[in-house]
Image (cartoon, rainbow, N blue to C red):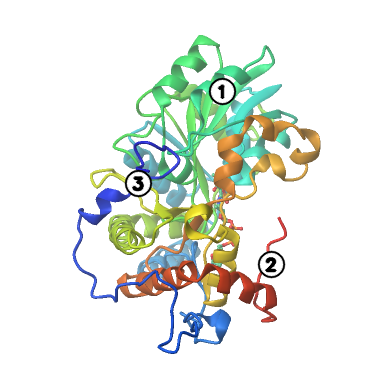
């Protein structure tokens, strides 16, 4: 069945033709490995005693290290100036650059993405019920619940993995005050339709763009398609500030309010105007953020090359599909998102992830099992899953692979070769995992 017929299969067919330079790697034979005597040989995997693919664990979120000299120069300047935090000059410079890159007027930097979400939700006066995908990092949903707002989980589109507009439409009640969309993996989806729906029903529209810094020609805020967006600059993100976040908006009044709220609500010495918090970014984080921004183009280009390298190798493995990216797409290519079809590969995603861990490859089950199946939401909304078929299906199938500056063609070949070994001998791998006593073996319990 082609990806045209089944939207649940992610189309990567064109990766065979796009930039399809031969990699010089060996072809993978998917037939079970038989010795001349007819005795099946064990796959070449650490599970069966082979040398692990890597000496040290490779990660999805290994931080992209900045130019050390430039970072240290900034740290020197910070120490010499005596200004460590509270809206210092480097934070101001960081905000200006993020706003310019995103094509918007205002950016308010924060200590992390989660606090940025909490601030934006409060500043937009969201209360009661807010519509949100379950298929996201749990911080998205916590940021509502921690403020006494009921998250109403909606399903996602099976191809882009972002909110399904029809699912949102059917979930709106007279208690709904907003939509918290998530630009997952840098995908914005049908933002125009979501914006129309929000306007029609008088709802606020906030986008959790934690994954999406640098994605798209213009961010949704710049296109007038939402009230605000939130970025994460956590160490595991492609551009990072060790810990950091930001809210971008073209609404000057909202930006002014956020500027007060990020600093306890102070409008002047001893004058408080809003319920605020301490959400400020430090100068040390901004020093890292600025240095990381200077490497942004190099990081994106590297990730892009890696994405196509993964595409060429994964195209040889039936049943493992790489999320499609158009070659002209403006993307940070940070997350290498694959979908495992257990009916084709004969083994569950979780077993593949377990076997890879023994190879020192930390593939991730992002975002398993979906927030609606996590505490406290699973107890509060036990029937939520009934309306989330795509979420539940994808959360059992998605496997995210390591990327970033620490990965290259050769390491990608090592990762994909081990995946190919696993799916070439599913029964042996399953049996091997059952018997495995290696202390590094991860048995997933959910
Ligand atoms: N909304 C969405 C959609 C998000 O994805 C996130 C965060 C947020 C909101 C909230 O933004 P922040 O408040 O975090 O700014 C990681 C990150 O902690 C989190 O920022 C990110 N999303 C999420 C997708 O991934 P974990 O728990 O999966 O990461 P962790 O600690 O296992 O790190 C991954 C691996 O990277 C580690 O096992 C080892 C390696 N690593 C990590 C760090 C931090 C290093 O080698 N060095 C390091 O310093 O959550």
| Label 1 residue SS | helix
Label 3 neighbourhood size at 10 Å, few (<14), some (14-19), many (20+)? some
Q: Which residue is mark 3?
A: 324
Q: Are marks 1 and 3 in contact (CB under 8 Å)?
A: no
Disc on res. 443? 2
> Residue 414 appears in which quarter of the rendering?
bottom left
Where residue 153 sits: x, y (%)? 64, 31
Q: CA distance from mark 2 to mark 1?
A: 35 Å
Where residue 133 sits: x, y (%)? 58, 34
Disc on res. 168? 1
Where residue 182 sits: x, y (%)? 51, 36
Q: CA distance from mark 2 to mark 3?
A: 30 Å
Residue toward you, 44 or 283: 44
Residue plotted at (18% across, 64% down): 21
Residue 280 in view: no
Does the beta carbon of the residue at mark 2 sit less than 8 Å from ligand 1?
no
| Label 3 residue SS | loop
Q: CA distance from mark 1 to mark 3?
A: 24 Å
Instruction: Name the N-terminal-most of marks 1 and 3.
Output: 1
Q: Quadrant of the N terminus?
A: top left
| Label 2 residue SS | loop
Instruction: Name the N-terminal-most of marks 2 and 3.
Output: 3
Residue toward you, 14 or 258: 14
Q: Quadrant of the C terminus?
A: bottom right
Residue toward you, 278 or 419: 419
Where residue 293 sits: x, y (%)? 36, 54
Is residue 360 placed above or below 369 in the rendered structure?
below
Is residue 341 placed above or below 129 in the rendered structure?
below
Residue toward you, 110 or 44: 44
In the picture provided, is 287 more to the left or to the right than 302? right
């Amino acid at each position: 069945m082609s990806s045209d017929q089944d939207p649940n299969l992610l189309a990567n067919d064109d990766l065979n033709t796009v930039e399809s330079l031969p990699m010089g790697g060996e072809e993978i034979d998917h037939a079970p490995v038989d010795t001349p005597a007819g005795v099946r040989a064990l796959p070449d995997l650490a599970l069966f005693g082979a040398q692990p693919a890597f000496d040290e664990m490779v990660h999805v979120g290994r931080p992209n290290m900045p130019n050390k000299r430039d970072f240290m120069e900034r740290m020197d300047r910070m120490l010499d100036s005596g200004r460590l935090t509270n809206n210092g000059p480097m934070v101001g410079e960081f905000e200006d650059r993020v706003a310019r890159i995103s094509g918007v007027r205002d950016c308010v930097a924060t200590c992390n993405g989660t606090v940025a979400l909490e601030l934006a939700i409060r500043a937009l006066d969201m209360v009661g019920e807010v519509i949100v995908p379950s298929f996201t990092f749990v911080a998205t949903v916590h940021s509502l619940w921690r403020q006494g707002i009921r998250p109403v989980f909606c399903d996602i589109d099976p191809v882009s993995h972002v909110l399904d507009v029809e699912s949102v439409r059917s979930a709106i009640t007279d208690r709904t005050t907003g939509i918290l969309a998530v630009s997952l993996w840098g995908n914005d989806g049908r933002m125009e339709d979501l914006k129309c729906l929000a306007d029609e029903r008088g709802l606020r529209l906030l986008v959790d763009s934690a994954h999406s810094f640098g994605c798209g020609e213009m961010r949704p805020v710049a296109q007038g398609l939402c009230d605000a967006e939130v970025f994460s600059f956590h160490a595991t993100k492609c551009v990072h500030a060790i810990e950091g976040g930001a809210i971008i908006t073209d609404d000057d009044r909202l930006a002014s309010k956020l500027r007060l709220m990020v600093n306890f609500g102070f409008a002047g010495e001893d004058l408080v105007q809003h319920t605020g918090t301490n959400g400020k970014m430090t100068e040390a984080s901004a020093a890292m953020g600025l240095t990381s921004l200077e490497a942004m183009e190099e990081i994106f280009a590297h990730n892009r090359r890696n994405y196509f390298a993964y595409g060429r190798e994964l195209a040889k493995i039936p049943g493992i599909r790489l999320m499609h990216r158009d070659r002209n797409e403006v993307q940070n290519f940070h997350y290498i998102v694959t979908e495992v079809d257990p009916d084709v590969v004969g083994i569950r995603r979780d077993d593949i992830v377990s076997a890879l861990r023994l190879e020192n490859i930390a593939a991730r089950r992002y975002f398993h099992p979906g927030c609606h199946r996590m505490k406290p939401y699973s107890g509060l909304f036990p029937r939520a899953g009934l309306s989330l078929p795509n979420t539940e299906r994808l959360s059992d199938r998605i496997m995210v692979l390591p990327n970033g500056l620490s990965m290259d063609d050769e390491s990608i070949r090592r990762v994909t070769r081990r995946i190919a070994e696993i799916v070439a001998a599913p029964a042996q791998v399953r049996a091997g995992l059952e018997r495995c006593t290696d202390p590094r073996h991860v048995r997933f319990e959910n």
